[in-house]
Amino acid sequence: MLTVLLLLWPVAAALLLHFFKGRAARVPALGAALVEFALAAYAALTFNANNSGQFSFNLNWIPSAGIHFAVGMDGLSLLLVLLTAVLVPVILLSAFRRNFENESVFYALVLFMQTGLIGVFTAQDAFLFYFMWEVALIPIYFLAGVWGGVNRARVTFKFFLYTIIGSLFMLAGFVYLYFQTGPSADGLSAHNSALASFYALNLTADTQMWVFWLIFAAFAVKMPIFPFHTWQPDTYTEAPAPATMLLSGIMLKMGIYGCMRWLLPVVPMGVDYWQNLVLILAIIGIIYGAIIAIRQQDVKRLIAYSSLSHVGLMIAGVFSLTQMGLQGASIQMLAHGVNVVGMFFIADAIERRTGTRNIADLGGLTRKAPVLTVCFLVLLLGTVALPLTNGFVGEFLLLAGVYQFNHWMGAVAGVTIILGAVYLLRMFQRVMLGPDSSFTETFTDLTGSELALLVPLIVLVFWIGLFPNTFLHLSEGSVMNILNEVVKR
Amino acid sequence: MQETVIPAAGAPYSTFLYVLIPLLPFLGFLINGLLNRKLSGTVAGAISSLAVLGSFAISVFLFLNFQYQYTVTLFDWISVGSMQIPFSYQIDQLSLIMLLLVTGVGFLIHVYSIGYMHHDENVGKFFSFLNLFVFSMLVLVLGANFVILFIGWEGVGLCSYLLIGFWNKNTAYNNAAKKAFIINRVGDLGFLLGIFLIYLTFDSIQYAEVFQKASTLQIGTGVVTAITLLLFVGATGKSAQLPLYTWLPDAMAGPTPVSALIHAATMVTAGIYMILRANVLFTLAPDTLEVIAIIGAATALFAATIGLAQNDIKKVLAYSTVSQLGYMFLALGVMGYSTSLFHVLTHAFFKALMFLGAGSVIHAMSNEQDMRRMGGLRKSLPITFITFFVGCLAIAGIPPFSGFFSKDEILLHAFEHSKVLYAVGLFTAFLTAFYMFRLLFLTFFGEFRGTEEQKHHLHESPASMTLPLIVLAILAAVGGFMNAPFFLGEENAYLANYLAPLFTYSKQLNPAAFGVHADHATELMLIGLSVGAGVLGIILAYVQYVSRGVRPVEDGESRGLLENLIYHKYYIDELYNALFVRPIMWLSRGLFRYVENGIIDPIVNGFGRLTMGGGQLLRYVQTGSVETYLILMVVGIVLVMALNFGKF
Amino acid sequence: MNPNIPEVIQTVPLQYYVFFAAALFSIGVLGVLTRRNAIIIFMCVELMLNAVNVLLTAFSAYRADPNGQIFVFFIMAVAAAEVAVGLAIIVMIYRNLQNTDVNLLNRLKF
């Protein structure tokens, strides 16, 4: 039931938010997100790491088709639900600094999206998963399309089309798999779409080879993996900062989660067949994104390419099919969510003060903003995976996993730790350090509310870095289950 | 000795004591960092000095009461399957010596910094970074597994970055900081891959377990050679060896105490510490040792030649550091493990001393670093001069100063291993004596060559700066006696005997290559040769720069071909620029312009255009004329019927 | 020959109805295709409908199955409704254009 509550509360709050107009919607929106966070925290505290699938709820949604509204959480789901519940209040808070039209609608859409995201992370039925997958897409389309930058129309249109075409392939894949399943438990339908029935399918290797691509198409675009990534830098740059945070902080984890939950165990032989290809694409993405990031002038675009590089490593870890790789991906999803949201927030804070995101125009800001510098540096160090920050645990395990699968791939993927330092330090130096720029004189340090937003993120940077076992233990059981499903056939 | 290697049961003292060692500097970091501008410079300096002093006191306590090797586990850090990484310390001879070195020399340099950084507006920030460095370094030497070592390893890299770019208004300094971090990261990647391979080979990353399992392997096992080569890549980055040394001379952009602490005495020796830690693995891989010895000797010679023609006082010291680190690697390569650590210690004393002395000179000269503007300073800076002179004698290998003992032992080991390496080492010793005394003579002898204003300001530094100089000078003078040469009897080689348990496995695995077998006559002959080389260097420098009064060429004037090559550091930076930096920059732009925006994105957009274009074409079917529609419809129906004729 | 079918009906063979309906239908098609006056096109459409009605009735009678004739009633009812709406549209067109030439109605094109 708790899961249902987690799902329904944000959408209910989003509907209620229409009774508030403009700025008056801020406090109720944040309050609703905090309640959601409290619910998620309660779930985490009562969660039993040794059991799989808890807080389950199963409603016979379309009995004649064997489709159930089945939700539940295992450790992996819980991690991502927690991530969502932590980041949404932060993202709402970050929006408070902006002045824009129809604020209440904006917040309502963010909350509506939260339902979609949590739905994706908890769905135990293929069609519910697909449904939630699309539910999460609609609000972000409006968030980016209505409140975005100059090119927003073209960019969001491309993003929307790109991702929806990917999801249609996934739908086709699910429909195919659905017709391979046996009758539903109540006997009303000849087939059913439960996750467990998908896991239990006995498909030939040849079938799995092409079904793999149908399902993977949606995830490949969403994560995104090279070369399906070109919507990403444009969208991240054009979308308003809160939407960019939603996209990069939470939404791209949908793809990685999808791979772990709906791809690896469902078509293991297909995964086995395409494993090397996906790893090579992922590793190309790591290097390619990092190299392109080096020369970017726009801070947001630079972070977008860095995100491409980091996601590449997570994909590589997942497809290494090692325990370390999958666990690394689980913890890195959290770490990346925290870091990238923080980085985008700082980019936004700088843009609000100076009116520019162009690296060449900035410089010497540290002298006016020591607190901002420290926050920026901490998040940056998390991103370059310095030990004792959150990025290290993930990257260490991911690289170890990839290295375990193939030494050479591990070595090439490892180049990310060098290139990551190159582009991030270059950006940090050009923006914060160096001789005074024309903005230095009037620049101001972080305000109290901005700091209040960054402090939880910074706490998480060190918490995940110092005590990763808190989270690793949660996902351990799920990861082992997934690996067992993969090995079984 | 076998039984002392395996960790005995528990730690003799409360865990809290061990936590405190790195925690004290970390608290200093937090206090100074959070109260950055609210504390006066002296208070900030006092807090961080006391923090380091506290760690030093605990270290001394542990050192004096040390009986057996043990590990202390604080908490489980990362555990995934069999990849278990506890956050644990290992207390043994090696970590204790390094603890004493880091906190002891660190404390002196903290005290010195109180005087040196007095005028800087960001003193609090400086001391917080310095404390963070000490914290990282302590984690590095205390760690009981390779990943904890890696925490410290990266941590000191970060502090090095922060401190080199301390004066962040200057773009050149920032670039130097960035360069240091990135080149270190290149090495770190090697180290990281080495850790992965260790884990896959031994199914553990805990020192005790890995070395225990390794000791059962055969010498020359392929995978161990791979592991050690990867670890050595890490060491070349952190310890500034060929080909990754270029960051260290640039790192002199940082404040001088930083150069003394990080870039001479402690951090750069982390690579040597790591190899000493993993000496079992290295002993198993003679090929790697050969590589290490050759790279070490080559670096020593290479950096020494560059040192001959530098005019920046700190640059000379930087190249001399690279060169001396080369000696340490040479020692490791010829399995003179304890000798290497011996040189780490003596080098820490005399190089910290000389850097701090140089800082004192720079302080007196109002931030002038060019030796061509100095001269005759021994009258106005007597304490600095005398202590610096002691340092020069030590590095030149003149008995009985400390450098003589350690360098001599290295050369003895090298001689037993290979005559060529020995010759390179001996020649480098001659060069070292020459360029160090060139520095001494140019700075402290002859006539003053700076501006009148500088001359007016010349003054001896305050006590907080001279006191550490004096302490270090004493250590540099007598430090060598902690490990007396062999001909004085093995029992007097205190350090080697103390460290012996660390190398038990190595000794068992390869007894032939371990230790020195030369007779005393040979040893004395070698001592004579190396002292002769040192004295010759000093005499030549004296003739050149005091008797003949030669001055380095000014920037505008022309140089000889060879001198020009050396002055420009063999154009290595330019070479790396052309080989790595520019291609990557070019690739970055090229990929973005031609691949991202030229191929991938157009293909994606191409699908969109294809759809749009298709619609555009099909649009013309909509003529708007009802007749056309009707005709098409009828034709269609007739066609359908015709095609299906006879199928009903 | 089906004994259930009255003799009277069988005096005209089924083929004749089919040929007749086909002819009627073809006339309708040709009329729709060649004429430009909307009212005449409309009448031709009616012609085609009636051709189908004839066929349905004939088959219904020959097979002694009333379903076909019930269909015819439906078609007639729908056709009546269609005429009402269709004529109303044509009247509106005429009022606007003073003409009922369908070729003038070509605004809905690319």
Image (cartoon, coloured by chain):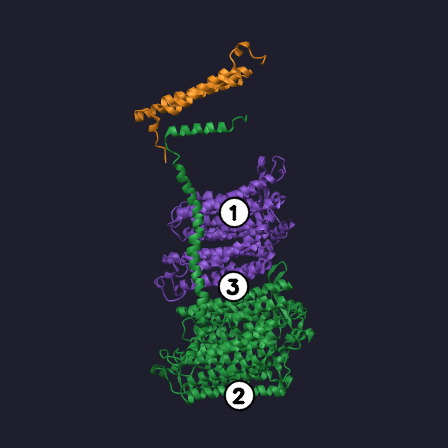
Residue in front for this viewpoint, B354 or B216: B216
Inter-mark Cα distance, 3 to 2: 48 Å
Chain containing the residue with disc 3 = A
Q: Secondary structure at mark 1?
A: helix
User: Would residue B32 be visible to someone looking at this image?
Assistant: no
| Image position of B464 (left or right of A184) | left
Q: Which residue is mark 2?
A: B532
Badge number at residue B451: none
Chain containing the residue with disc 2 = B
Q: Are dots 3 and 1 on a single chain?
A: yes
Verify CB contact (< 8 Å) between mark 3 and mark 2: no
Badge number at residue A217: 1
Residue in front for this viewpoint, A214 or B109: A214
Pointer 2: residues within 10 angstroms few (<14), some, or many (20+)?
some
Determine which quarter of the picture holds residue B173.
Answer: bottom left
Q: Position of residue C31 (x, y in %)?
A: 39, 22
Nearer the camera: disc 3 or disc 2: 2
Q: Secondary structure at mark 2?
A: helix
Chain containing the residue with disc 1 = A
What letter labels the chain drawn in purple?
A
Q: Which residue is mark 3?
A: A386
Inter-mark Cα distance, 2 to 1: 74 Å
Q: Colour of chain B?
A: green
Amino acid tagged 1 = Ala
Verify CB contact (< 8 Å) between mark 2 and mark 1: no
Q: Colour of chain C?
A: orange
Determine which quarter of the picture holds residue A176.
Answer: top right
Q: Establish if B169 lies above or below A61.
A: below
Image quarter hosting the C terminus of chain B = top right
User: Would residue A304 be visible to someone looking at this image?
Assistant: yes
Q: Position of residue A405 (x, y in %)?
A: 59, 57
Q: Position of residue A418 (x, y in %)?
A: 50, 63
